[in-house]
Amino acid sequence: MRDTDRHIITRRKNDLMIKWHVGVLNDLSSEELYKVAYERIRTFVIAQDRIYQEIDEIDPIARHVLGFRGDRLVAYARIFRENGHVTFGRVLTIPEVRGQGVGRQLIGQIEAEIQRHYAGELISIEAQIDKRGFYEKFGYHALGTVFNFNGSPHIRMDKTALRMAE
């Protein structure tokens, strides 16, 4: 990412610093884009045994949140507007860091970015059903029935709009 176009926020967990980068697709270096594609395919296509178009038309319009430990991408999500609300998806932490609080930190980064760029807008996500409890910890509420999205069960979850940080 170009230094002028990104936010860098660091957090410490277990003495391992996570450096957060946020930007649009054009802000990503070719190496960062490769790491994002690699981890998204590893997580959502290979590990979950789902065959679908992982890189899609949302990527060019989304804001991308990347978390690094050293040069290793350990967390990722994308944020975008759709159908009158803000949403985020492709939320992942790599298997090697799960259970270390990285997912909680990632949600914090996502919501901080939503406050910066989409304050006042309803947040509505499509969560994998087995992640429902995780999102409920952050105030998301399930709505409707379970549906199939790219080969796995999902549920809509909403959260009230976040206000601009004061």
Image: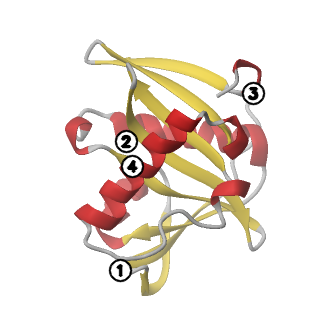
Separation (CA) of disc 2 from disc 3: 24 Å
> Local crowd at mark 1 within 10 Å, few (<14), some, or many (≥20)?
some
Residue beneath disc 4: 38
Left or right: where 144 falls relative to 71: right
Q: Amino acid at mark 2?
A: Gly
Pointer 4 with pointer 3, Cβ within 8 A: no
Q: Residues within 10 Å of mark 3 (few under 14, many from 20)?
A: some
Q: Distance between the Cα atoms at labels 1 and 3?
A: 36 Å
Image quarter in which the C terminus is found = top right
Structural crowding at the residue carrying mark 4, measured as other residues with C-alpha within 10 Å and reported as few (<14), some (14–19) or many (≥20)? few
Q: Quadrant of residue 7?
A: top right
Decide: is 96 above or below 68.
below
Q: CA distance from mark 2 to mark 4?
A: 18 Å
Q: Earlier in the sequence, mark 4 or mark 3?
A: 3
Kindly identify which numbered label has been placed on residue 153: 1
Residue under label 2: 103
**Could you tell me which secondary element the residue under label 1 belongs to?**
strand
Q: Residue at x 31, y 55 (%)?
A: 42
The residue wearing badge 3 is 5
Q: Marks 1 and 4: which is nearer the front?
A: 4
Asked where in the image residue 96 lies, by quadrant, the reply is: top left
Q: Earlier in the sequence, mark 2 or mark 3?
A: 3
Of tags 2 and 4, the one toward the viewer is: 4
**Above or below, comparing residue 8 to residue 55 in the picture:** above
